[in-house]
């Protein structure tokens, strides 16, 4: 096991203990996989990465739910009626509540860099938006699906 992988497992173990959860092998596997993917994953996507033969589907679903309740994961529905889970960890430079891109071709979700909401021309935001909670989702086709991969 590489030093970086071991360090990640230790960080995840500490996070679980901070919220009063045992650092079980399945919980650590879920957290490490979400850390390595660095973007939101659905339960089926996570099961594919973990290996369906190694982990029980219902147990992984319960783990995702427990970790979201403990605010270690963010659970989100990007409008396509699919719950996705994203790790909230100290290694990310992206803001906690950030925008996502949902590819309508392959359904892959990627995190977008921090964005700023402003009016054209630089005028003040409408009062309804000042202090409002904004959740931005952008849809389209990713570079792989359009053949423009960089």
Image (tube, rainbow, N blue to C red):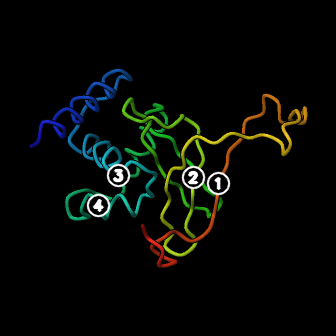
Callout 1: SS: strand
In the rendered view, tell whether residue 21 sits above or below residue 46: above
Residue position for label 2? 100
Numbered badge on residue 137: 1
Residue drawn 36% across the image and 33% down it: 91
Numbered badge on residue 129: none
Residue position for label 4? 49
Q: Quarter of the image holding residue 24?
A: top left
Residue drawn 88% across the image and 32% down it: 124
Callout 2: SS: strand
Question: Residue placed farthest to the front in the image?
Answer: 121
The C terminus lies in quadrant: bottom left
Q: Are marks 1 and 2 in contact (CB under 8 Å)?
A: yes
Q: Which label's residue is closer to the chain start, 3 or 4?
A: 3
Residue 32 image position (x, y, % from top left): 28, 43
- Say whether residue 33 is left or right of residue 128: left
Residue position for label 3? 37
Q: Which label's residue is closer to the chain start, 2 or 3?
A: 3
Residue 60 image position (x, y, % from top left): 34, 51
Q: Which label's residue is closer to the chain start, 3 or 1?
A: 3
Graded by Cα atoms within 10 Å as few (under 14), some (14 to 19) or many (20 or more), the crowding at tag 4 reads: some
- Say whether residue 73 is left or right of residue 13: right
Residue 33 image position (x, y, % from top left): 30, 49
Callout 3: SS: helix
Q: Are marks 3 and 4 in contact (CB under 8 Å)?
A: yes
Callout 4: SS: helix
């Amino acid at each position: 096991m590489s030093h970086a992988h071991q360090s990640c497992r230790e960080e995840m173990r500490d996070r679980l203990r901070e919220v009063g959860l045992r650092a079980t092998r399945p919980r650590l596997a879920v957290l490490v996989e979400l850390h390595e993917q660095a973007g939101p994953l659905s339960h089926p996507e996570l099961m594919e990465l973990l290996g369906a033969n190694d982990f029980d589907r219902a147990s992984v679903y319960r783990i995702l739910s427990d970790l979201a309740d403990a605010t270690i994961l963010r659970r989100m529905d990007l409008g396509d009626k699919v719950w996705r889970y994203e790790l909230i960890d100290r290694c990310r430079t992206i803001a906690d509540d950030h925008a996502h891109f949902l590819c309508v071709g392959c359904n892959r979700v990627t995190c977008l860099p921090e964005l700023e909401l402003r009016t054209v021309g630089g005028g003040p935001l409408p009062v309804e938006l000042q202090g409002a909670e904004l959740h931005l989702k952008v849809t389209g086709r990713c570079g792989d699906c359009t053949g423009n991969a960089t």
